[in-house]
């Protein structure tokens, strides 16, 4: 995955970790539903994205989608279709910036995949408040996925696999995600992995 070496993103990760450690005095056991722990700093490129794509930043309520077989199949279809349609390319190579969030047409990096999946699911009638952009860490680098809140737990749509997985069964250390109540805000995510890997948070960022 392409490296994005912006100081803004490094500061975002560092501030998020400090807030997480303050907000969570003990380690919460990871389960099938993410637990949030208060306000987080949004990724630096997120607010400019929201200014362009306001419909993708609107949420409200605490919607949990009832996951029947048809809905489960739809998640798999959208995840696979976007992964097969979009070719991975760094923001620098794609648009000439180190960090840029957008709805991709042909090329993009991980957050662009997640954004397109959110839009495609919203087109199919999925509520935006159940579709939350989420940032994590993987092998020392940043990563963005789409978290879908369902009756069967919080599921992750990921550009690195066509499988739709429970968030607690992925190899990521999760930091923050869009708030369900206000899609322009972000919330910290509790979890054993996030706390255990926190000291590595300022090493660098890959979207």
Image (cartoon, helix red, strand yellow):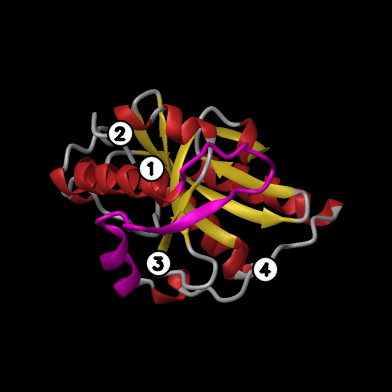
Residue 140 image position (x, y, % from top left): 34, 25
Q: Which mark is residue 63?
A: 4
Q: Nearer the viewer, residue 25 or 12?
A: 25
Task: In this rendered view, identify the residue nearer to me: 142 or 1.
Answer: 142
Mark 3 residue element: loop
Q: Where is residue 98 drawn, in percent x and y?
A: 18, 45
* Residue at mark 1 to residue at mark 4: CA–CA distance: 28 Å
Please name the residue shown 26% across and 57% down the image.
Answer: 45
Viewed as shown, does residue 95 lie left or right of 16?
left
The numbered dot on residue 21 is 1
State the image coordinates of residue 207 (x, y, percent, origin top left): 34, 41
Task: Please tell me in which quadrant of the rendered image residue 120 appears.
Answer: bottom right
Q: Earlier in the sequence, mark 2 or mark 3?
A: 3
How far is the residue under mark 4 from the one under mark 2? 31 Å
Check the picture and name the quadrant holding the N terminus: top left
Front-most of residues 31 and 57: 31
**Which of the two marks, 1 or 4, is nearer to us in this view?**
1
Front: mark 1 or 2:
1
SS at badge 4: loop
Q: Residue at x 57, y 60 (%)?
A: 131
Task: For the residues labelled 4 and 3, say whether their Cβ atoms are less than 8 Å apart.
Answer: no
Q: Is residue 169 left or right of residue 191?
A: right
Sequence-first tag of 4 and 3:
4
For discs 4 and 2, the disc positioned in front in the rendered view: 2
Read off the residue under disc 2. Answer: 201
Segment tinted magenta in the rendering: 24-52
Q: Which mark is residue 185?
A: 3
Mark 3 or mark 1, which is nearer the start of the sequence?
1
State if disc 3 and disc 2 touch (CB < 8 Å).
Answer: no
Mark positioned earlier in the residue sequence (1 or 4): 1
As measured in the structure, the alpha-carbon distance from the residue carrying label 4 to the one carrying label 3 is 16 Å
């Amino acid at each position: 995955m392409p490296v994005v070496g912006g100081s803004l993103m490094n500061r975002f990760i560092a501030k998020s970790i400090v807030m997480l450690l303050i907000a969570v005095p003990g380690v919460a056991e990871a389960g099938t539903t993410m637990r949030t722990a208060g306000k987080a700093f949004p990724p630096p490129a997120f607010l400019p994205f929201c200014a362009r794509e306001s419909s993708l930043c609107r949420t409200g309520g605490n919607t949990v989608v009832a996951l029947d077989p048809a809905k489960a199949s739809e998640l798999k279809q959208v995840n696979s279709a976007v992964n097969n349609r979009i070719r991975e390319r760094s923001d620098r190579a794609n648009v000439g910036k180190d960090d840029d969030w957008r709805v991709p047409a042909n090329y993009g990096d991980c957050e662009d995949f997640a954004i397109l999946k959110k839009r495609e699911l919203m087109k199919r009638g999925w509520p935006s408040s159940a579709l939350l952009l989420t940032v994590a860490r993987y092998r020392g680098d940043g990563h963005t996925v789409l978290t879908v809140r369902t009756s069967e737990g919080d599921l992750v749509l990921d550009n690195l696999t066509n499988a739709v997985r429970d968030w607690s069964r992925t190899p990521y250390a999760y930091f923050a995600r869009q708030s369900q109540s206000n899609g322009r805000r972000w919330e910290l995510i509790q979890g054993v992995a996030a706390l255990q890997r926190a000291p590595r948070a300022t090493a660098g960022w890959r979207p």
